[in-house]
Image (tube, rainbow, N blue to C red):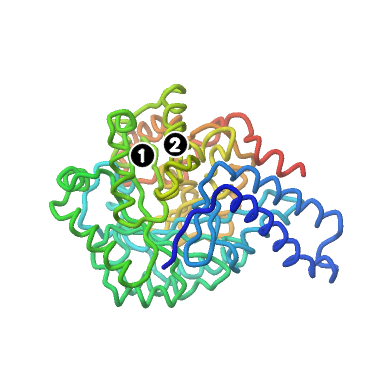
């Protein structure tokens, strides 16, 4: 599959092409009276503003479709135009466009940081038909990016396949995997069903260190074989890496990027350590403002400097969650999470629940959650309220996380979202 980055004059021309193409694509809706002239103008203003906000990213073309952000579907595609429709909502909160869904808790690994560490004690995986119904409901309401995971999703391949079959080309599908039980045949089958990429974990460039971190002596070999299978099936490969604070100053970050290049990754997602799941009790690395600025400088070097143009694009939570960009996107602002048991969580790193799709009406759960997150803020809620979650977890003698909806309410009923994110505030006003 042909892959190349878009930079310099090419990036300028690409921006123009996107704007013109979107204008032409949606113009018939204006001409047919489906949208008023004033709303069409506001829609285009919002799109221009959003595109401008994405210019810090390294744009990458994957098999003829170009990405401006990890969670924005490739252009041109039906999924990309679905994501654009987000900006056509004017009289209510902008719709959510991304969901992370877990099809199973089954996994042979024991990752130190796993945000599902306490979820796995909660019983059987939710009926897959329930998850399929929710996926269809969400797609009809504008979700354009489905991120499917486990545990290890390929351990529940029939469930994974059934969920993918329910999602049409209005949305992209990316799968998170350790590489376990992946095969070329399965990847080719999933590609025909619309799966766009598989993301693997590369938390260390050293095989033994990765094995220790993931709690399995074969983790490295399983991952590299999975990557090789993707290349054989012509399936794009992405990587995620959860690096500690010191890894950005001791050379580890650069080593990860070198190895990502060798593995043929198109995008590397840098996950900020979060005090959730496996790290809920011990806590996670704290980054000072100075630390964050140091990391951002390195990321911008890899994404924007001509000297690093051959490296994969980086999507970094440290930048995406910055108050100058998206802030906190949880709670259906731009994304949310449904775990393998059916619990609806605002984010995989927030171990609270608004209800369960196995027993409650999803539309009501979703509506309640979106009301709680009515105004997107700059506060990193997963960090600020992890102590409250841990306290309630211990005091209630609960056997599993996330907290029940009743206990969860004690966390969110008085919490502070911080200052409203400027990007979302301006989009709503346009």
Image coordinates of residue 60 in percent, x first then y, are 50, 55
- Label at residue 213: none
The reply to whether callout 1 and callout 2 are in contact (CB within 8 Å) is yes
Q: Which residue is mark 2?
A: 382
- Dot 2: few (<14), some (14–19), or many (≥20) neighbours within 10 Å? many
Decide which of 248, 3 is in the foreground and name it: 3
Image coordinates of residue 322 in percent, x first then y, are 53, 34
In this rendering, position of residue 139 left or right of residue 227: right
Q: Which residue is mark 1?
A: 276
Q: What residue is drawn where x is 46% and y is 40%? A: 317
- Residue 324 figure quarter: top right
- Residue 204 figure quarter: top left
Decide which of 200, 266 is in the foreground and name it: 266
Q: What residue is drawn where x is 40% and y is 35%? A: 389
Q: What residue is drawn where x is 79% and y is 51%? A: 42
Image coordinates of residue 292 in percent, x first then y, are 44, 28
Q: Give the CA separation, mark 1 to mark 2.
A: 7 Å
Q: In the rendered image, which quarter contains the C terminus?
A: top right
Decide which of 248, 364 is in the foreground and name it: 248
Q: In the rendered image, which quarter contains the N terminus?
A: bottom left
Q: Is residue 284 visible?
A: no
Image coordinates of residue 350 in percent, x first then y, are 43, 42
Q: What residue is drawn where x is 47% and y is 72%? A: 194
Nearest to N terminus: mark 1 or mark 2: 1
Decide which of 239, 420 is in the foreground and name it: 239
Q: Under tag 1, what secondary structure?
A: loop
- Residue 52 figure quarter: top right
In this rendering, position of residue 270 left or right of residue 370: left
Please determine whether, in this image, residue 303 is positioned above or below residue 383: below
């Amino acid at each position: 599959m042909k892959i190349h980055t878009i930079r310099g004059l090419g990036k300028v021309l690409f921006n123009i092409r996107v704007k013109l193409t979107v204008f032409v694509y949606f113009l018939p809706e204006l001409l047919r009276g489906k949208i008023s002239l004033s709303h069409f103008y506001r829609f285009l203003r919002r799109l221009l503003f959003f595109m401008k906000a994405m210019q810090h990213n390294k744009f990458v073309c994957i098999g003829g479709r170009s990405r401006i952000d990890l969670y924005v579907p490739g252009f041109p595609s039906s999924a990309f135009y679905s994501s654009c429709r987000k900006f056509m909502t004017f009289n209510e909160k902008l719709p959510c466009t991304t969901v992370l869904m877990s099809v199973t808790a089954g996994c042979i690994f024991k990752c130190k940081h796993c945000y599902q560490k306490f979820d796995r004690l909660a019983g059987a995986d939710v009926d897959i038909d329930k998850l399929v119904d929710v996926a269809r409901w969400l797609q009809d309401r504008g979700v354009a990016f489905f991120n499917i995971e486990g545990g290890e999703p390929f351990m529940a391949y029939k469930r994974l396949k059934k969920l993918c079959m329910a999602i049409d080309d209005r949305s992209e599908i990316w799968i998170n995997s350790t590489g376990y039980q992946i095969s070329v045949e399965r990847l080719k089958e999933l590609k025909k069903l619309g799966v766009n990429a598989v993301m693997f974990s590369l938390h260390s460039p050293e095989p033994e260190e990765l094995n220790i971190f993931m709690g399995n002596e074969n983790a490295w070999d399983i991952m590299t074989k999975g990557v090789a299978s993707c290349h054989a099936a012509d399936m794009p490969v992405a990587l995620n890496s959860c690096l500690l604070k010191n890894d950005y100053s001791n050379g580890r970050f650069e080593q990860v990027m070198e190895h990502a290049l060798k593995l043929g990754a198109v995008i590397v997602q840098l996950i900020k350590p979060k005090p959730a799941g496996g790290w809920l009790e011990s806590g996670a690395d704290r980054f000072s403002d100075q630390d964050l600025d140091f990391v951002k400088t390195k990321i911008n070097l890899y994404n924007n400097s001509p000297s690093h143009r051959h490296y994969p694009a980086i999507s970094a939570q440290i930048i995406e969650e910055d108050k100058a960009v998206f802030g906190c996107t949880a709670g259906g602002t731009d994304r949310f999470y449904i775990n393998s048991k059916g619990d609806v969580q605002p984010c995989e790193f927030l171990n609270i629940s608004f209800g369960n799709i196995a027993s409650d009406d999803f539309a009501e759960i979703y509506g309640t959650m979106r009301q709680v997150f009515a105004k997107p803020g700059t506060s990193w809620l997963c960090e600020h309220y992890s102590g409250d979650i841990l306290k309630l977890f211990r005091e209630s003698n609960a056997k599993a996380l996330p907290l029940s909806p009743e206990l969860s309410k004690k966390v969110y009923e008085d919490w502070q979202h911080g200052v409203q994110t400027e990007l979302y505030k301006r989009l709503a006003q346009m």
